[in-house]
């Protein structure tokens, strides 16, 4: 497997960065600054929970292309009053909406990517927009070679155009590109489109009370429990 | 100036990498392997010379969107026989066409970019395609935060869409983005579109016998003789 792969492309939310603790922490900080108390994990879960449905509005054509920053903002404008926040200034809302640009990585993400980068092209292939992924890369120390996003292709995963587009724009055959994710649905779609696949499960993504299916599947080419283990399995 | 700029975007061919010596060296190596002798600098100059006219066919709509690898290949297929090369295999031609992915950087490029990266988002904004720029970045040690290309916007510089698109996709105001180049025409267009500008002239780009205009202009915000000097002027 690893002899034909030339690029690894990565899901980010959950796979490389811990969105739940990072967003909850920032929501707590904002609540404290505004003199209120909130259930910040529920805030993070509800913000993230609107992600799929809002993207599906774009994927179905119900609304025109809208990047993830703008979809996050549409959700945020509903969430803030429902959690009892007082009115925020536009500047405060813009800054807080970029909480998704300031997510902490899992401890093995940067060491693993740094090793993988010595032998492969590494890029996100995420539904996050280019600015979000670029800023997150700098914030979390993810040493990308380039940044590929749903926004690059004006289609959200799991649309075919994202997987096909990644191989095409990298100038590679489909199976020379390895989709790497903590989510089986992403990997199943990538394999259906002809990409190679690596599964790095993140049992803690949704918090300690939400079990995650960490078993392998026949559409998974490489299984690793961390990005440092993945680097080792990929010969780095 | 430097207090409002948040991202620097860079021309690459000539500005960051020495295309002329790098392509000539690879042409010489191929000629030697094929048992012929060529004027390798003329080869490099003619290959590069077809760049503007071939892009203009795309810009004018004469041919549909074609990325730079494919434009380079169209030129190469004419150049090889005219320089007396024997027939090459498809694999040899594909590999040699990627000479433009393997260009050496000027000595100050990587040190300057590394310093600028500590304070700003840094990205190419080049007519090179994404694969070319990504591979060149790895080959030449250019530590990009992301890779923006004409291909991202399906327009070649100096079309407006490239400059406007760079600011938009980075989520920044136009003057928060600084176009950085060794070529005045690129900077003049960037300033007309509202971007900030930095000029780093490269007197040796076209060889020792071709003079380069290194004087500043009123549309240039920052002038530096190297990327390390630019880093210093930008507070890094």
Image (spheres, coloured by chain):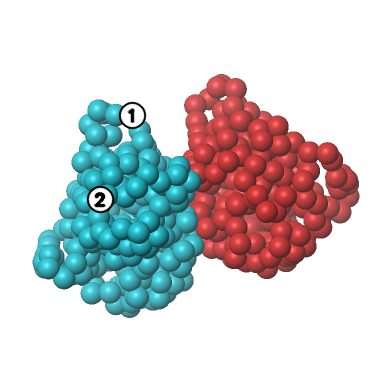
Chain colours: A cyan, B red
Q: Are marks 2 and 1 on the same chain?
A: yes
Residue B200 visible to the viewer: yes
**Residue B13: x, y in percent?**
67, 49
Q: How far apart are marks 2 and 1 (CA)?
A: 29 Å
In the rendered structure, the answer to whether residue A9 lies left or right of residue A57 reads: right
Identify the residue shown where x is 72% and y is 50%: B1
Mark 1 chain: A
Identify the residue shown where x is 21% and y is 57%: A42
Depth check: give the residue in front, A212 or A87: A87
**In the picture, residue A211 is in which quadrant?**
bottom left
Residue A178 visible to the viewer: no
Relative to residue B56, is residue B21 depicted above or below? Answer: below
**In the picture, residue A142 is in which quadrant?**
bottom left
Identify the residue shown where x is 77% and y is 46%: B221
**Residue B83: x, y in percent?**
69, 44
In the rendered structure, the answer to whether residue B168 lies left or right of residue A148 reads: right
**Residue B62: x, y in percent?**
56, 21
Q: Mark 2 points at which residue?
A: A83
Quadrant, the C terminus of chain A: bottom left
Helix, strand or loop under label 2:
loop
Quadrant, the N terminus of chain A: bottom left
**In the picture, residue A218 is in which quadrant?**
bottom left
Q: How crowded is mark 2: few (under 14 residues within 10 Å), some or many (20 or more)?
A: some
Mark 2 chain: A
Relative to residue B16, is residue A149 depicted above or below? Answer: above
First-in-chain label (2 vs 1) = 1
Q: Name the residue under label 1.
A: A64
Depth check: give the residue in front, B127 or A142: A142
**Residue A147: x, y in percent?**
45, 53
In the rendered structure, the answer to whether residue A132 lies left or right of residue B60 reads: left
Q: How crowded is mark 1: few (under 14 residues within 10 Å), some or many (20 or more)?
A: few
Q: Nearer the viewer, mark 2 or mark 1?
A: 2
């Amino acid at each position: 497997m690893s002899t034909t792969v030339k690029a690894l492309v990565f899901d980010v939310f959950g796979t490389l960065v811990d969105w739940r603790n990072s967003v909850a922490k920032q929501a707590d900080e904002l609540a404290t600054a505004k003199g209120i108390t909130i259930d910040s994990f529920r805030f993070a879960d509800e913000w993230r929970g609107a992600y799929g449905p809002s993207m599906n509005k774009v994927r179905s054509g119900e609304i025109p292309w809208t990047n993830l920053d703008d979809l996050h903002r549409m959700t945020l404008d509903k969430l803030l009053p429902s959690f009892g926040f007082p009115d925020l200034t536009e500047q405060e809302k813009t800054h807080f909406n970029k909480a998704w640009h300031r997510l902490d990585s899992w401890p093995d993400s940067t060491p693993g990517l740094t090793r993988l980068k010595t032998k492969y092209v590494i890029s996100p292939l995420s539904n996050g927009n280019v600015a979000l992924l670029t800023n997150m890369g700098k914030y979390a120390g993810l040493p990308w070679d380039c940044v590929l996003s749903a926004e690059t292709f004006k289609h959200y995963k799991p649309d075919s155009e994202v997987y096909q587009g990644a191989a095409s724009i990298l100038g590679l055959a489909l199976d020379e590109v390895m989709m790497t994710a903590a989510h089986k649905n992403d990997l199943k779609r990538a394999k259906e489109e002809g990409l190679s696949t690596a599964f790095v499960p993140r049992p803690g993504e949704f918090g300690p009370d939400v079990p995650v299916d960490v078993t392998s599947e026949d559409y998974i080419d490489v299984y690793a429990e961390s990005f440092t283990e993945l680097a080792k399995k990929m010969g780095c």
